[in-house]
Image (cartoon, helix red, strand yellow):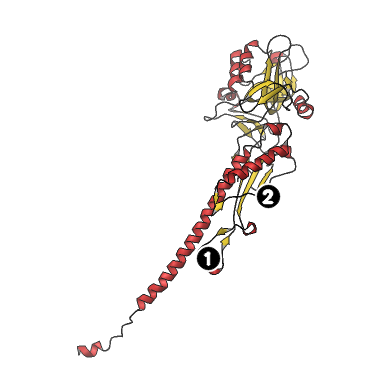
Amino acid sequence: MFYFLSTLRKPRRRGAVSVLAALMVIVLAACLALAIDVGYLCLVRTQAQVAADASALAAGQSILTEDRLRGYFQRVYDSARSVAAQYAGLHRLGPANANLQVDEDVIIGRLDDPTDLRATLDTSYPATYNALAVIVRASEERARQCPLFFARVFGIDGRDVQATATVAYADRIVGFRTSSRNPTTSLLPFSAKVESWRDLLKNGLEDNWTYNPKDRTVAAGPDGIPELKLFPIDTGAAGNWGTVDIGCDNNSTADLRRQIRDGVNADDLAEYGGVLTLDKTTGSLTLNGDTGISAGMKDAMVDIVGKGRTILLHRSVEGPGNNANYEVVGFAGIRVVDVKMTGNQKYILLQPAYVIDPTAAFATWSSESYFVTQPLRLVR
């Protein structure tokens, strides 16, 4: 009986598991091959993005220079492109280092609103450029695709890889706001007529001082950047010029010396709710003034010679003495090159300078501000 039942069992299928295992090995090998190719492609894309970010940040640092203030825009931007290529070349991009074709891969232009991710760089006016984009590519067109390994079985030798990084200076500055990280600003308690500032930029002829960016010193002699003799308040009345009250009214000489040396601070701005800013509707703000510049400020002024600072720009001044009111319409980055605080011919001599201030407040609307900007940052 047992023998009869055993003859009814189905015959064994020897080797069925081996066939299945062989098929699974093939599938797993294909998945592994795909994972290796995809993983390598992701690695190269990451390398491209790192190269783009680093080269854009390095090159962006070089677009605000003394040569740009002299009007040598082409020289400045050619140098920035060279810096971008140099830094990109330090990064691996697959089997070789990244290689930029600077005329195509480095774009310098303007972004009015660096926070607008859809905006394109405007290359119309080189004097206003504030942004730089770097494109890092590994493409078939340039005979250097990202190589693949196992995909070649299917006739796919490589894939194009591209990464873009854009950096920008936000330079539509409308005021100043301190923080715990940055408790003081670059703002000085002085103001210049906006018409005089415009004339300086257009027709400035006086050029008797030279700034050395290497050691940040000032010496006699021309450097191609014009100078402006500043009288903080000038309404035509004798003796009616002085300083601007930023913070409490009637600042003491000690307060002014502090503001000159260190800049306006958080306590000063507390008077305005923590931020001193132009009104969006009028494009201006009103500040009170004081009469006379004290000789006690001389040492403080001498201490900041050669250092970047920000002054106010006013459209008009009304009223005499302590009753003077500025109509402030903007801000300007400057460098003090000479001071005379005694006698009848007191003056502060300054020249335009780029001032990068993290406390500067940016707005999307236009203001009458020059050469003051927030720090460079990656915007896309």
| Residue nearer the viewer, 235 or 222 | 222
Secondary structure state at the residue bearing disc 1: helix
- Asked if 34 appears above or below 310 in the picture, the reply is below
Q: Which mark is residue 241?
A: none
- Asked if 160 appears above or below 207 in the picture, the reply is below
Distance Cα–Cα, label 2 vs label 1: 30 Å
Locate residue 263, reporting x and y percent. Answer: 60, 23
Looking at the picture, which amino acid does disc 1 mark?
Answer: Ala
Mark 2 Cα-neighbour bin, 10 Å: few <14, some 14–19, many ≥20: few
* Mark closer to the chain start, 2 or 1: 2
Q: Residue at x 55, y 47 (%)?
A: 91
* Residue on which disc 2 sits: 104
Q: Quadrant location of residue 206?
A: top right
Locate residue 157, reporting x and y percent. Answer: 56, 64
* Residue on which disc 1 sits: 151
Mark 1 Cα-neighbour bin, 10 Å: few <14, some 14–19, many ≥20: some
Give the total number of marks visible in the rendering.
2
| Residue nearer the viewer, 247 or 63 | 63
- Asked if 190 appears above or below 84 in the picture, the reply is above
Secondary structure state at the residue bearing disc 2: helix
Residue 42 seen in the current view: yes
Q: Dividing the image into 4 quarters, which one contains the N terminus?
A: bottom left
| Residue nearer the viewer, 131 or 249 | 131
Residue 116 seen in the current view: no
Residue lying farthest to the right in this orientation: 203
Q: Quadrant location of residue 21?
A: bottom left
Looking at the picture, which amino acid does disc 2 mark?
Answer: Glu
Locate residue 128, reporting x and y percent. Answer: 71, 37
